[in-house]
Image: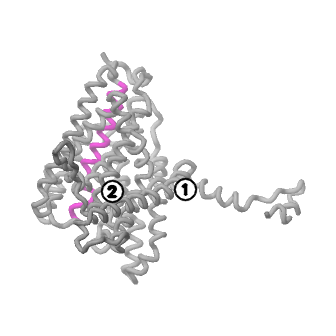
Amino acid sequence: MVETPRAAAKGPLDSAAHLAVLDGLRGIAIFVVLWYHVWEWNWLAAEFHAFGRTISLQFIAETGFTGVDLFFFISGFVLFYPYARALFEGAPLQTVAHYAYRRFIKIVPSYYLQLLILTPWIVAAFSGATLLKVYVTHLLFIHNWFRDTFGSVNGVLWTLAVEVQFYVIFPLLCWAFRRRPFLTFAAILVIANGYRILRGHCCLGDYVVMTQMPAFLDLFASGMLAAWLFVWLRTHVAGLARWQHWLTVVAVAGFVCYGVLLYSQFKLRVVPNWQYVWANGHMTLLGATFIVLTVASCLAASWWRALLANRLLVFLSVISYNLYLWHQLIATFIARHALPFPRTADFASDRVWQWTYLAETVAISIAVASLITYAFERPLLKRGFKAVTDLFSRRWPPAPARANGRPSPVADSPQTRA
């Protein structure tokens, strides 16, 4: 039985609680990225002993960079979700101006704030025309196009460039996706795989070439298709809640497949340029896996959704952007300055140092990210630039006026200024 979109939209699935799964997935993404970048410095083996057996999660630690792939997928979902709702639920269609403003207010202020804070180090590291190029390319989010600016300020910022470049073409992709979703999705798969295969023949070991935006288009498109499928199922399939337990099984299976894909990548690490070799053959499959586990999880039983959207993962999701911006800088600074000092020359065998470094890096990164998120990012997201202008209006309140329009002398009294 099929309901009309408007009738189905009134059902129990029309709830933001089902999209809390996206917060959980974003929390997982930043968790594995953080784990990977900390492991790059302390080499702490992810092995545990239980019931006489050794359980190794090392394949997650060494493939944690795929959390970036999950971020790209989530971006595609979140960006297209309002348009999917407009398509199937009759929600107001988001304007391009509103879309551009929301993307700007989310991404640019915290990013520019980091560049401002890092200015003394940037100026000390570069000079002349190179300094100008570093600033211009970073301000315009095109620093990943050039070998001498790629990773020159912060190693993780290349992904921000890819993200913003996708934002620029998203309105066009969205227009096509709303009219021919599967045809558009197929075309994007051809473009992404074509780019990776063609560039892989000549430039497989060239990280600048292999990490350009076209190489990740199928992940963004997978997120868009997942949003389309989720809203279509939510609005067109009656009694979908009766299938929630089977959908939970599908969601669990999706996560198992995700783990299998990560393990297959981990086993390939002995091959030169293994990350790109694996991506060329598995990126589209990874996107399909994300579609399955995300759509199924959003429609799964409440206990599964609550498990994914637990408080820790939701908290990590809230601070994820600033945690992503700052964690590698902090991890690198602590490691290069030997804080804390390893007790042995071979720090990889010093378990006390490894765990201390892990705890210190994670704690400082979360503290910095939380401060910037709650004191800077969230006020801007909630109130826009009024959050900034109101600070000045509170600091210098307008003087009360007399009936004739002139300021009252009481406004200049010591008591008023105090």
- Determine which residue is flagged by label 2: 34
- Name the foreground residue: 306 vs 353: 353
In this rendering, position of residue 184 left or right of residue 272:
right
In this rendering, position of residue 214 left or right of residue 194:
right
Q: Quadrant of residue 280?
A: bottom left
In this rendering, position of residue 156 left or right of residue 259:
right
Residue 291 appearing in the image = yes
Mark 1 to mark 2: distance in Å?
22 Å
Residue 224 is inside the magenta segment: yes
Residue 151 is inside the magenta segment: no
- The residue furthest front is 52
Q: Is residue 265 above or below residue 356?
A: above
In this rendering, position of residue 406 left or right of residue 237:
right
> What's under tag 1, amino acid-wise?
Ala
* Number of numbered discs on residues: 2
Residue at the (38%, 39%) spot, across then down: 309
Q: How is the image coloured?
A: one colour
- In the picture, the quarter occupied by the N terminus is top left
Q: Quadrant of residue 114?
A: bottom left
Instruction: Characterize the magenta stretch by its predominant secondary structure.
Output: helix
- Determine which residue is flagged by label 1: 375
Residue range in magenta is 208-235
Number of other residues with Cα within 10 Å of mark 2, as a class: few under 14, some 14 to 19, many 20 or more: many
Residue at the (19%, 42%) spot, across then down: 51
- Name the foreground residue: 241 vs 11: 241
Q: Residue 408: x and y, percent?
A: 87, 60
Residue at the (27%, 43%) spot, across then down: 222
> What's under tag 2, amino acid-wise?
Leu
